[in-house]
Image (cartoon, grey):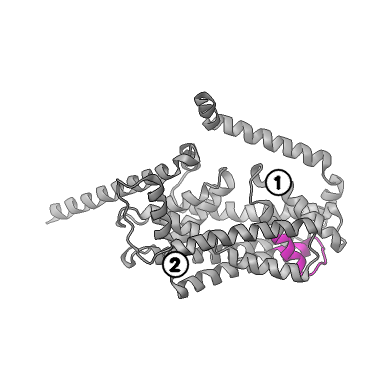
Amino acid sequence: MKRFVRLWRSGWMQLLLAVVALALAFAAIYWRGPEWGAVLEAFQLVIWTWIVLAFLLNVVSTIFRALSWRLTVGQALPSEHQPKVIHVFSSFGVGLLANAVVPGRLGELARVATLRRHLPDAPPGTSATLVGTVFAHRLFDLVPASLLVVWVLLTAEVPHWAVVSFVIAAFVGFALFTVAWLGAKRNQQSVMSESMSSIRQLFVMGRQGLAVLKEPVPLAGAVLLQCLGWLMQLLAVYATMQAFDIHAPLSAAGLVLVLMNVATIVPLWPGNVGLVQAAVALPLRNYGVPYATGFAFGLALQAIEMACGIGLGLLAIAREGISFAMLRRMDDEEDSSEDAVAEVRELVEDHDEASESESEAAREGAAVSR
């Protein structure tokens, strides 16, 4: 059993499984997918100015979402340890890139580790608090997603199979939000005791980072920014529809955006390529859009989103001086979900030791100068 676990945790085995899953997915797409000649023809007729507009709208969406996280972090940390906006943007970009190129949604930890580098004087446990802010920030997606789902159900032609997915996702999401809100606290102290159990440490992490849920005004601001981010994404989908000469109403773009998010909740293979496109193309047939055109449209949407994340991420790692090897090393250190608490604790201790060393060096330098 232990040999099997070690084999499963091996980076080479995970890479092999990812390659096999991706190969099987592409084989299924090729043999059971659309008419590829029609897909290529759809790309030949694309109006590229609309594609550029869709890309820029995705960039604006990312800016709004990063500002929302900045408000969340601002409520979780003491006033004397607030990060600069540029550092939040940069950390958010590193997270986008990590999610795009490293499996396992490691981007959430990557942006925490990146932002923590800019808070050397923050108290012990700050990294753990930042993990909680990431969780809170992800919860804010429930509000715009719920508004979008209600609007789509009232105005768009929604397939019956999609309605069930909407209901399940909404139920799980609001259950998580309720638990998070009840567990949030205003206390901005971020201290963990060595004697705490792992479960207790995880609980303390979350509570410290969820402070914004108990502050009505910052909470409203963070949710509003997240809603604006979703609005920009909706307009980006609509702009891409115009690029492919798809004359469907804005509610159809809303349906596409919801289904794209549902199709990527569970990562069956890298990017869920093929599944996302099928989820987009099938409902568009009700609007008279050929399946091949809808499939090409779905490919373009996913490519635009990835280009935005990778482009902003490359700018961020260039500014931060982070290499792809460092992102890869983060993935290698994430052995299992059972080690998540230990990993975050180790991250906290590493940063706290670095902070103490820097403070000690500064005091020695001041003594020498005197």
Which of the 4 quarters of the picture holds residue 190?
A: bottom left
**Residue 269 in picture, x, y percent from top left:** 66, 41
Residue 240 appears left or right of 345: right
Q: What residue appears at the point 35 percent right and 63 percent down from the top-left corner?
A: 188
Q: Secondary structure at mark 2?
A: helix
Residue 275 appears left or right of 62: right
Q: Is residue 250 above or below residue 3?
A: below
Q: What residue appears at the point 44 percent right and 65 percent down from the top-left corner?
A: 85
Residue 248 inside the magenta-drawn segment: yes
Depth check, front residue: 354 or 191: 191
| Mark 1 residue type | Val
Q: Main secondary structure of the magenta part?
A: helix
Identity of the residue furthest to the left in this view: 370
Q: CA distance from mark 1 to mark 2?
A: 35 Å
Residue 11 inside the magenta-drawn segment: no
Q: Secondary structure at mark 1?
A: loop
Depth check, front residue: 185 or 81: 185
**Residues in magenta, as a range:** 237-258
Q: Is residue 84 visible?
A: no
Q: Is residue 284 above or below residue 346?
A: below
Q: Say which residue label 2 marks.
A: 212
Residue 349 appears left or right of 1: left
If you read the primary sequence from the N terminus, does the residue marked by circle 1 or circle 2 appear first?
A: 2
Which of the 4 quarters of the picture holds residue 350?
A: top left
**Residue 247 in picture, x, y percent from top left:** 83, 67
**Residue 277 in picture, x, y percent from top left:** 75, 51
Residue 152's tag is none
Residue 273's tag is 1
